[in-house]
Amino acid sequence: TQLLEQSPQFLSIQEGENLTVYCNSSSVFSSLQWYRQEPGEGPVLLVTVVTGGEVKKLKRLTFQFGDARKDSSLHITAAQPGDTGLYLCAASNVGYSTLTFGKGTMLLVSP
Amino acid sequence: SQTIHQWPATLVQPVGSPLSLECTVEGTSNPNLYWYRQAAGRGLQLLFYSVGIGQISSEVPQNLSASRPQDRQFILSSKKLLLSDSGFYLCAWSLGLRNTEAFFGQGTRLTVV
């Protein structure tokens, strides 16, 4: 069973600041996904990374998969209040039909 | 396009009462289906998953059960609810095979009193 550690657990920043959150494990993954969840709703898929060293950008969000495929980071530039939510990473391995989720980073962006 | 429906959105049930939560998916065939529980807005715990009709895998032994009577229908049940069953329940689907990208329903907030 893979264990995904997310840090920090909670982050409170002002609008316009930059931030990075992390997802780490001692295991190697075949793919890793990032989701964002707003209160009272289901998580929404943001991105999937599958290649070591891969970098994907989604507007102000930059996702990176570690070279060894054991860790990932999410960087947000010029955060906005609309970025507020719980950011979850999830990983899977070849041959498995299920995902393992981290406990998430709760981000609060204040105006 | 694919959509997932989960209901009800909120539910308050007394201890010892039965439970039935339903989830349906539209716009895809033979999806993998999942039930998760989320405590206090944190990480998701996988409860059950299904790769086909009548095929259910349980991840955590507990007071709950799941069934898949039709290809795109997934039901979470309990005969007698416990206080500890309270939580936010999420249904999700994925394409399966080698694609585990999950698409979630809106969730059900269950409070057992």
Image: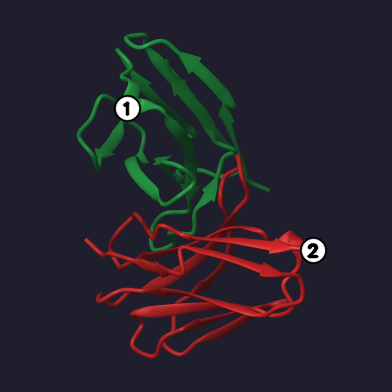
Chain colours: A red, B green
Relative height, residue B52 to residue B69 (above, below) = below
Foreground of the two, B77 or B87: B87
Nearer to us: label 2 or label 1: 2
**Amino acid type shown at disc 2:** Pro
Specify the label residue B84 is tagged with: 1
Residue located at (29% from left, 36% from top) = B55
Specify the label residue A111 is tagged with: 2
Q: Residues within 10 Å of mark 1 (few under 14, many from 20)?
A: few
Foreground of the two, B50 or A100: A100
**Which quadrant would residue B68 be assigned to in this image?**
top left
Q: Secondary structure at mark 1?
A: helix
Residue located at (47% from left, 35% from top) = B88
Relative height, residue A58 to residue B58 (above, below) = below
Residue located at (61% from left, 78% from top) = A19
Position in image of residue A13 (x %, y %): 66, 69
Q: Is residue B4 visible?
A: yes
**Same chain? Circles 2 and 1:** no
Compared across the picture, whether A42 is left or right of A66 comes to: right
Q: Residues within 10 Å of mark 2 (few under 14, many from 20)?
A: few
What chain letter is assigned to the residue under label 2? A
**Which quadrant would residue B49 be assigned to in this image?**
top left
